[in-house]
Image (cartoon, helix red, strand yellow):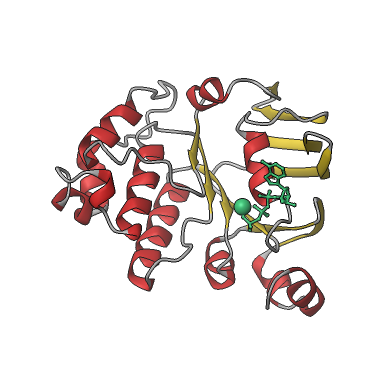
Amino acid sequence: MLAIDDVHAYYGDSHVLHGVSLQIEPGKVTSLLGRNGAGKTTTLLTVMGFLTPRKGRVSLMGQDISGMAPHRISRRGVGLVPQERGIFPSLSVEENLLVAARGAHSGNGSGWQLDRIYKVFPRLAERKGNMGFQLSGGEQQLLSISRALMLNPTYLLMDEPSEGLAPLIVHEIVEVVKEVRAQGMGVLLIEQNLSVALDLGDVHYVLSKGHVCFRGDSETLAHDEAVLSTHLSV
Ligand SMILES: Nc1ncnc2c1ncn2[C@@H]1O[C@H](COP(=O)(O)OP(=O)(O)OP(=O)(O)O)[C@@H](O)[C@H]1O
Ligand SMILES: [Mg+2]
């Protein structure tokens, strides 16, 4: 399990996370919701080691990884799909994938290689010689997800993967999340699109001003009018 326990995180003097605890379990999608500025990305950056919690801890399979360097956390099997996508604009699609694979985690061998990526996302196969900057927003997002999968991670952290994308691409993303969950990967999904989150999330955490104000399944969340209207823009 990948867990954060009573984490307090700061940017300089600005106290952003106030004792956040959550668990990301293998074979499940853990959804993290909340309004703009609630602390979702900050939570993910703390899990990934970009921020060191001032209090509390991040643990991976029981080991304390709080503040460990991000590349080391990544090598232990935690893949990241960042909010800004993080692809190399001046490398081709295929080069982007091969560069990502160099950091691969030797652990569980979940079997993501070029041919599987191209099978799941045929539009990336068609564009494998194109440069990153020549891709549409949707193609960039598929490439960003594929780069994370090339690491063959045990856990996958995704920051608003469907943001601004056409329904057809969102559907492809939903399907690949279901596929990696079925193979046992643990997914942390930050989503603004509530219907995507309700469809995919096995458990939901709602953040408000750096506090967890709700934890529950889709059924419970979908009926919690107070949480939906106060803490989500529904
Ligand atoms: N680099 C930074 N320096 C200082 N404050 C920051 C920094 N990044 C974020 N913040 C602040 O921390 C708080 C939480 O931001 P965060 O990016 O985690 O929110 P979020 O829930 O991911 O929002 P969004 O839905 O807009 O992506 C906000 O008040 C934000 O202004
Ligand atoms: Mg964010």
Residue 24 can be seen, yes or no: no
Q: Residue at x 39, y 23 (%)?
A: 103
Q: Closer to the camera, 200 or 68?
A: 68
Quarter that holds the C terminus: bottom right
Marks counted in the figure total 0
Residue at 35% x, 30% y: name it.
Answer: 100
Taking the image as shown, residue 51 lies to the left or right of residue 55, namely left
The answer to whether residue 11 is seen in the rendering is yes
Residue 104 horizontal/vertical position (percent):
38, 24
Residue placed at 65% from the left, 68% from the top?
A: 218
Against 196, is 76 above or below?
Answer: above
Q: Quadrant of residue 63?
A: top right
- 195 relative to 88 in the view: left or right: right
The picture places residue 158, in percent across and down from the top left corner, at 52, 48
Residue 209 to residue 171: above or below: above
| Residue 132 percent across, percent down from the top left | 27, 45
Q: In the visual, does 17 lie left or right of 29?
A: right
Query: 121 or 144, which lies in front?
Result: 144
Q: Is residue 128 above or below residue 62?
A: below
Q: Position of residue 90 (x, y in %)?
A: 26, 38
